[in-house]
């Protein structure tokens, strides 16, 4: 009894804490990638990325501040003359407006329809996997092929779209020849192609949600819509943000389907920044001005993607 009374508990406690205190530090050192020599294996990938990404970007920046001619000659540094020409050109602002229009319309509609379709795809019903595979066919089809097929569908005289409208008594529509309708037609094609992609991501996110909050809401008598709005959507927000970020990068640089179907027309109504830059470089033979437009497109992608990333990090806190 006297021995127990005279034992200093603080000493025994500190002695028992010392091994535990050192263990995390040793564990962190063991899990440190650099301690196991990972960098020599990652260095080739870093070098390839630098060559394939950083070098072209640096060369494009140099073209945008120089005067490159169509014959390959370059008269040297011009400063920001190409940027001043770009900002003073009404076609640039029109292409920026078209890019943002297609981005906003397609992203919102694809997200809403993808959420509804993703919920259906997440249900345990017979043939669900077959249905998911069939829904992905538009997304895995080459955009050039999609553009050619829809070009035939929207033909003003022989296309299936106007034939269907004629069956219900609606006048034919000039889908790709009217400046007011052509942007919506392009948006319709993109929505048809990429909504299943959004639905697949959202479906996987719905199936990974925990069941406890929904069971608690059901016990409290909450309705299905109230549960989905107050519990389902907040839990699904990180998945929605990632899906929207993936579509954002593709929508801002939208090119192939537009070029196949309209080449930016009619009257520049579908002339996005990417199409405008392509025409400037390969049709008008102005490589320096085209490089300036691509730098503007890169800046737009960085700003929008950075905004989504910031929103995601803030929502995760």
Image (cartoon, helix red, strand yellow):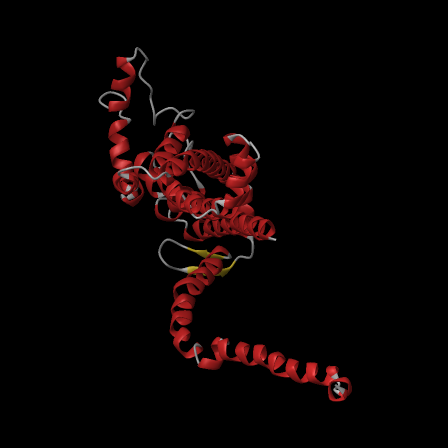
Residue at 56 percent of width and 54 percent of height: 80
Residue 76: x and y in percent read 48, 61
Residue 151 location, quadrant: top left
Q: Is residue 40 above or below residue 113?
A: below
Nearer-the-camera pick, 62 or 56: 56
In the visual, does 89 lie left or right of 154? right
* Residue 14: % across, % down: 69, 82
Q: Position of residue 96 (x, y in %)?
A: 50, 39
Question: Taking 115 as reference, is 231 left or right?
Answer: right
Q: Nearer the viewer, residue 116 or 146?
A: 116
Query: From the viewer's perspective, is 73 left or right of 310?
Result: left
- Where 263 falls versus 21 (above or below)? above
Count of numbered labels shown in the rendering:
0
Furthest toward the top, the residue is 169
Quick one: 77 or 252, which is closer to the camera?
252
* Residue at the farthest left position: 158
Quadrant of the snapshot with the N terminus: bottom right
Please tell me whether residue 307 is drawn above or below residue 24 in the rendered image.
above
Residue 290 in picture, x, y percent from top left: 43, 49
Q: Residue at x 63, y 79 (%)?
A: 21
Kindly tell me whether residue 265 is visible in this rendering: no
Q: Is residue 314 visible?
A: yes
**Residue at the extreme front of the image, as rendered:** 1
């Amino acid at each position: 009894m006297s021995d127990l009374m005279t034992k200093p508990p603080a000493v025994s406690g500190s002695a028992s804490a010392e091994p535990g205190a050192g263990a995390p530090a040793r564990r962190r050192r063991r899990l440190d990638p650099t301690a196991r020599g990972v960098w020599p294996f990652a260095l080739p990938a870093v070098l390839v990325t630098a060559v394939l990404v950083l070098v072209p970007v640096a060369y494009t920046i140099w073209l945008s501040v120089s005067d490159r001619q169509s014959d390959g000659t370059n008269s040297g540094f011009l400063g920001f003359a190409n940027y001043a020409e770009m900002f003073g050109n009404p076609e640039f602002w029109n292409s920026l407006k078209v890019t943002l229009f297609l981005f906003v319309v397609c992203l919102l509609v694809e997200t809403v329809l993808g959420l509804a379709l993703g919920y259906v795809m997440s249900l345990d019903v017979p043939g669900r996997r077959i249905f998911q595979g069939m829904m992905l066919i538009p997304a895995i089809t080459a955009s050039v092929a999609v553009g050619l097929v829809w070009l035939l569908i929207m033909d003003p005289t022989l296309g299936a779209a106007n034939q269907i409208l004629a069956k219900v008594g609606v006048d034919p529509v000039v889908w790709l020849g009217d400046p007011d309708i052509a942007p919506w037609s392009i948006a319709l094609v993109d929505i048809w192609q990429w909504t299943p992609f959004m639905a697949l991501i959202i479906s996987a996110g719905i199936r990974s949600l925990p069941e406890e909050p929904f069971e608690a809401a059901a016990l409290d008598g909450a309705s299905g819509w109230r549960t989905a709005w107050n519990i389902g959507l907040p839990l699904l927000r990180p998945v929605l943000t990632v899906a929207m970020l993936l579509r954002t990068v593709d929508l801002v640089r939208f090119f192939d389907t537009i070029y196949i179907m309209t080449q930016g027309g009619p009257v520049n109504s579908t002339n996005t920044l990417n199409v405008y830059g392509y025409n400037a470089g390969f049709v008008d033979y102005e490589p320096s001005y085209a490089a300036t437009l691509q730098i503007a497109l890169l800046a737009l992608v960085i700003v929008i993607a950075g905004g989504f990333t910031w929103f995601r990090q803030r929502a995760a806190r």
